[in-house]
């Protein structure tokens, strides 16, 4: 009998004090998402933003890097250390999932590029199409290639993919909205772990960053479907497929 998969969540931010009592942490959000889609592995959270890492890479079968308000391409000591750690994980052939900041950091660390988006903040619910060039190479876990809608909150993007990566999701606002390196890496710019209530709470911190008209458009978009659990199932199946 195969032992349960051991997943390390590398937590790259601390919630704002006003939000922490209700939403606790990104690690808890991801644990809740994976629980909701039937992931039966063992999960442990490491706040790498505070320097807390697994003692040994091989203590875990797979790794997930969370979102963050910080820049994945910055030279802060903890971000430089995390990029180096992710390179080591890749060389050790550990499956990795990256979300938002994690998506950008993995692209940047593995030979691609992340940076500021030309079009500013992306907020609310956004819909993405499957990249047609990737349809023939989609991993087995991906369901029918229908558009995907996700909650987003970012002003940085992946600007160039790392070697061996294939685009999965794309739209006019964010060309590399999801990518994978087959059997190795799965990354999304959007936030499958977010709820709409959490997104609404974050919008209060963006009022000075976008116009009132843009804010109204973002608020209106929250009436659209958010398919976080769908992506949660992709994440679950990606992890399971590496642990057979």
Image: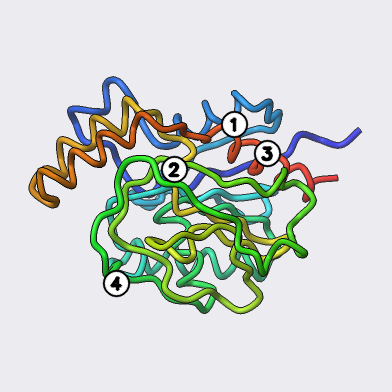
Q: Quadrant of residue 81?
A: bottom left
Mark 3 = which residue?
236
CB within 8 Å, label 1 to label 3: yes
CB within 8 Å, label 3 to label 2: no
Helix, strand or loop for disc 3: helix
Q: Identify the disc placed on residue 24.
A: none
Helix, strand or loop for disc 1: helix
Mark 2 = which residue?
191
Helix, strand or loop for disc 4: loop
Lower sequence index among marks 3 and 2? 2
Helix, strand or loop for disc 2: loop
CB within 8 Å, label 1 to label 4: no
Mark 4 = which residue?
75
Foreground mark, 1 or 2?
Answer: 2
Residue at x 63% of width, y 68% of height: 166
Q: Quadrant of residue 124?
A: top left
Lower sequence index among marks 1 and 3? 1
Q: Is residue 187 above or below residue 77?
A: above
Q: Nearer the viewer, residue 202 or 134?
A: 134
Report whether 212 appears left or right of 196: left
Q: Residue 169's x, y, as percent?
A: 55, 57
Mark 1 = which residue?
34
Screen quadrant of the N terminus = top right
Q: CA distance from mark 4 to mark 3?
A: 32 Å
Residue at x 41% of width, y 63% of height: 172
């Amino acid at each position: 009998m195969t032992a349960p998969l051991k997943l390390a969540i590398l937590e790259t931010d601390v919630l704002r004090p006003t939000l922490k009592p209700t939403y606790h942490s990104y690690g808890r959000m991801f644990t809740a998402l994976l629980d909701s889609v039937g992931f039966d592995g063992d999960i442990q959270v490491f706040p790498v933003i505070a320097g807390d890492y697994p003692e040994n890479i091989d203590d875990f079968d797979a790794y997930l890097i969370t979102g963050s308000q910080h820049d994945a391409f910055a030279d802060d000591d903890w971000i430089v250390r995390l990029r180096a750690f992710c390179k080591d994980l890749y060389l050790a052939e550990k499956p990795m999932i990256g979300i938002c900041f994690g998506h950008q950091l993995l692209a940047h660390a593995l030979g691609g590029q992340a940076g500021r988006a030309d079009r500013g903040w992306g907020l609310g619910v956004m819909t993405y199409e499957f990249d047609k060039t990737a349809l023939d190479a989609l991993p087995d876990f991906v369901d029918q290639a229908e558009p995907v809608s996700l909650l987003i909150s970012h002003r940085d993007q992946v600007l160039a993919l790392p070697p061996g990566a294939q685009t999965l999701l794309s739209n006019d606002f964010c060309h590399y909205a999801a990518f994978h390196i087959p059997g190795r890496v799965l990354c999304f710019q959007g936030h499958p772990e977010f709820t709409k209530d959490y997104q609404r709470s974050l919008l209060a911190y963006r009022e000075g960053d976008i116009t009132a008209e843009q804010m109204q458009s973002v608020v209106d978009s929250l009436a659209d479907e958010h398919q976080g659990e769908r992506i949660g199932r992709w994440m679950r199946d990606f992890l399971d497929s590496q642990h057979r």
